[in-house]
Amino acid sequence: MTKDGIRIYEDADFDGMHKAGRLAAEILDGIAPLVFPGQTTEAIDARIEEMVNEAGATSATIGYKGYKHASCISVNHVVCHGIPGTKLLKDGDILNIDVTVIVDGWYGDTSRMYVAGKMNRKAERLVQVTHDSLMKGIEAVKPGNTFGDIGHAIQSYVEAHRMSVVRDFCGHGLGRVFHAPPNVLHYGRPGTGPRIEEGMFFTIEPMVNLGRPETKILADDWTAVTRDKSLSAQFEHSVGVRADGAEIFTLSPGNLFHPTYTTD
Ligand code: MF3
Ligand code: CO
Ligand code: CO
């Protein structure tokens, strides 16, 4: 069944999404000790690929539009789609690691922020606001609300903290496929957009910049960076809609979603 072109999943389908989401989150927990100054993002990605294989799962990103890696790793002013490489992480670098796995045909997509060494104050504020904006978006997930309510919750929170929401990338429906309708915008006006219904599965994955919201794509035709070179952060959960709100498929089993490791 679909509503406004958005697939409505069955009760039993939530189990499949929980399995896929849990594996993606476990992998993000597992690589936390690998993030340190002097490390390469290539080495982190190699371990992610190994963990996907050890679990008997499939990476959704390897082979996707010609992409060759099991993760995207976006450092500092890289907004998203950072390609793992040989550059060494420096003390104070912040990075988003984004993993999508396929388990029994179900897609689990999640990303979170890490720091190499010690985070500076400005970066810490950005990471905190970005994390909390995702949670505000998730709180707006209720049958009868609209996708514009999610975007508005995120945008108003971010802008109240004098930061900006990236417009050029959005969340997406997922489930049996990686990217499906709707586009989940991280900005918007209350009451606009499609209605949120029970059984919808989608990601919310706000990208927040310390400076202006504009992005550009590097000469590799892939990596997105902030135009003004300001620092950028992102968190992503995959969620399903229940009668009383969002069920998060990608909760961290080790409570490591937030890089201070004190709260979730
Ligand atoms: N996981 C990303 C998302 O949140 C998509 C990565 S596509 C890739 O939708 F090809 F860059 F891996
Ligand atoms: Co996603
Ligand atoms: Co993702």
Image: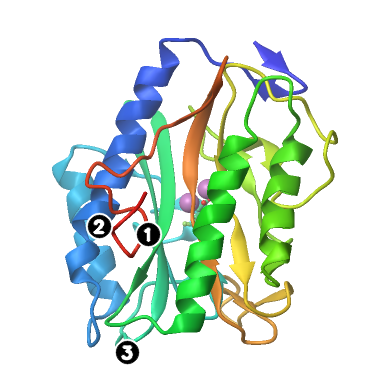
Q: Residue at x 73, y 78 (%)?
A: 212
Using the image as rendered, state which of residue 226 and residue 191 is in the foreground: 191
Label 3 – label 2 distance at C-alpha: 21 Å
Residue 40 falls in image quadrant: bottom left
Q: Residue at x 69, y 83 (%)?
A: 227
Give the secondary structure at mark 2. Answer: helix
Which residue was labeled with disc 2?
48
Which residue was labeled with disc 1?
71
Which residue was labeled with disc 3?
90
Give the secondary structure at mark 3. Answer: loop
Using the image as rendered, state which of residue 14 and residue 208 is in the foreground: 208
- Tags 2 and 1 touching, CB below 8 Å: yes
Q: Is 75 left, or right, of 260 in this rendering?
A: right
Q: Which is closer to the viewer, label 1 or label 3?
A: 3
Label 2 – label 1 distance at C-alpha: 7 Å
Of the residues shown, which amino acid type is indicated by label 1? Ser
Q: Position of residue 6 (x, y in %)?
A: 68, 24
Using the image as rendered, state which of residue 209 and residue 63 is in the foreground: 209
Of the residues shown, which amino acid type is indicated by label 2? Ile
* Chain-order first, disc 3 or disc 2: 2
Judge the density around disc 1: few (<14), some (14-19), many (≥20) Cα neighbours within 10 Å. Answer: many
Q: Is 219 left, or right, of 63 in this rendering?
A: right
Residue 45 falls in image quadrant: bottom left
User: Cβ of disc 1 within 8 Å of ligand 1?
Assistant: yes
* Chain-order first, disc 2 or disc 1: 2
Give the secondary structure at mark 1. Answer: loop
Of the residues shown, which amino acid type is indicated by label 3? Lys
Residue 166 visible in this rendered orientation of the protein: no
Q: Position of residue 53 (x, y in %)?
A: 19, 46
Q: Position of residue 113 (x, y in %)?
A: 40, 64
